[in-house]
Image (spheres, rainbow, N blue to C red):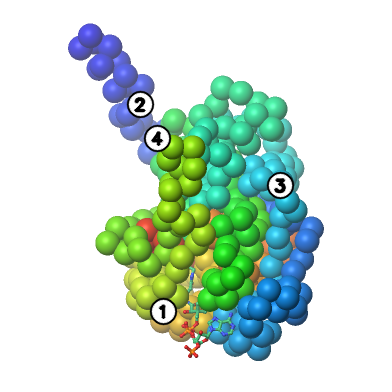
Amino acid sequence: MANRIAQNLLTTQPSPTQSQQNRYARITGTGSFLPPQRVTNADLVTQLAATGVETSDDWIVERTGIRARHFSAQGVLTSELAVTAAQNALQAAGLQAGDIDLIIVATSTPDMVFPSTACIVQNKLGIAGCAAFDIQAVCTGFVYALSVANAMIQSGAANKALVIGAETFSRILDFKDRTTCVLFGDGAGAVVLEASATPGILATDLHADGKHVGILCVPGNVSGGAVDGAAFLHMDGQAVFKLAVGVLADTARTTLANAGKTEADIDWLIPHQANIRIMTSTAKKLKLDMDKVVVTVDQHGNTSAASIPLALDTAVRSGQVKKGQTLMLEAVGGGFTWGSALIQY
Ligand code: ACO
């Protein structure tokens, strides 16, 4: 028995060999997917007015920077968006699904209570056997997932990982609540992370403070064959705003320090796309001009865990982000969670 435990410890926690000390994780491909139904502020204003909910393009743009978002068609699940994003990332990396030995999906809108959306994605990609699991850190989910995949690759537990952020937030929006339903959208983004002898993920920094659970949550749960509690997103926008602007620059600075870099080394800030005012405030604190910030919130809205990989893929495919550049990813989300990752792309 003791031998078996010792053996298990050896297989899960190998002592670092020389080659593992020089083992890093690099992004070798990015992909994304937006459901085809694009809903502009004008579309939403009209749809909401029909049910007596009053809002305006001016209010939404001025307070958030959002001009449009995408909504999935009825019945389309998060895993379907995730699979297309993953296939696009695999193609960009020049890999087949069968090359992947780890799948992590960050999502707060899983297909089912269980099993994980990652297992569903694995099956839809036509592969089996590799580790697959979900991470739940709401809008910080992709940064958490990237950090975990990086650690697993560095330890030798994985070689080629798919890290996906995918959401169908439209399913948890109360379209009678104008303070939240104008903010969110659906979509998915993915990266392929591969073991490499040269650094890719330079440093990461993760945090949570569970005393703020109530300011951003979907408080319901499944019990006795029904939803017990509310199944719609609840948010105290001002409390979230205050916490967000308080922590984002700090986590970015911690990650820079961990990597031995400074603000001046950042080529692109790729923030969680929740609100342009939060992004502007963070950029200012990091002494970065807004032309160094990737902004997609205007076209995607807040897609929670999908927002960073969606923004990254958009910036890669548009030619903004180039090989070798230094990228700072940072996010806040329900939990309250926050974190950042510095990447040599
Ligand atoms: N259209 C028109 N008026 C509106 C709307 C709307 N859609 N929503 C609210 N209002 C009204 C309010 O009723 C209020 O009216 P009143 O002054 O007559 O009472 C007024 O606008 C101002 O409301 P506030 O809530 O004070 O507006 P604020 O400037 O704080 O902006 C917002 C709200 C955009 C939600 C902001 O607080 C914010 O961005 N917070 C952060 C949200 C965020 O980042 N969330 C994502 C976190 S990530 C995750 O984990 C999911």
Circles 3 and 1: CB atoms closer than 8 Å:
no
Q: For residue 191, say whether it is visible.
A: no
Q: Residue furthest left?
A: 2
Q: Looking at the image, which residue is at 63% across and 47% down? A: 78
Which amino acid lies under the numbered mark 3 shown in the image of this protein? Val
Crowding at mark 3 (Cα within 10 Å: few <14, some 14-19, many 20+): few
Q: Locate residue 321, reporting x and y percent.
A: 65, 64
| Labels 4, 3: front one | 3
Tell me the SS state at disc 3: loop
**Numbered-mark total:** 4
Q: Looking at the image, which residue is at 60% across and 51% down? A: 166
Tell me the SS state at disc 4: helix
Q: What residue is shown with label 2? A: 12
Q: What residue is shown with label 3? A: 76
Q: What residue is shown with label 1? A: 238
Q: Locate residue 117, reporting x and y percent.
A: 57, 39
Which amino acid lies under the numbered mark 4 shown in the image of this protein? Ser
Q: CA distance from mark 3 to mark 1?
A: 32 Å
Q: Is residue 41 left or right of residue 144?
A: right
Compared with 237, 270 (above or below) is above
Residue 155, label in figure: 4
Residue 318, label in figure: none
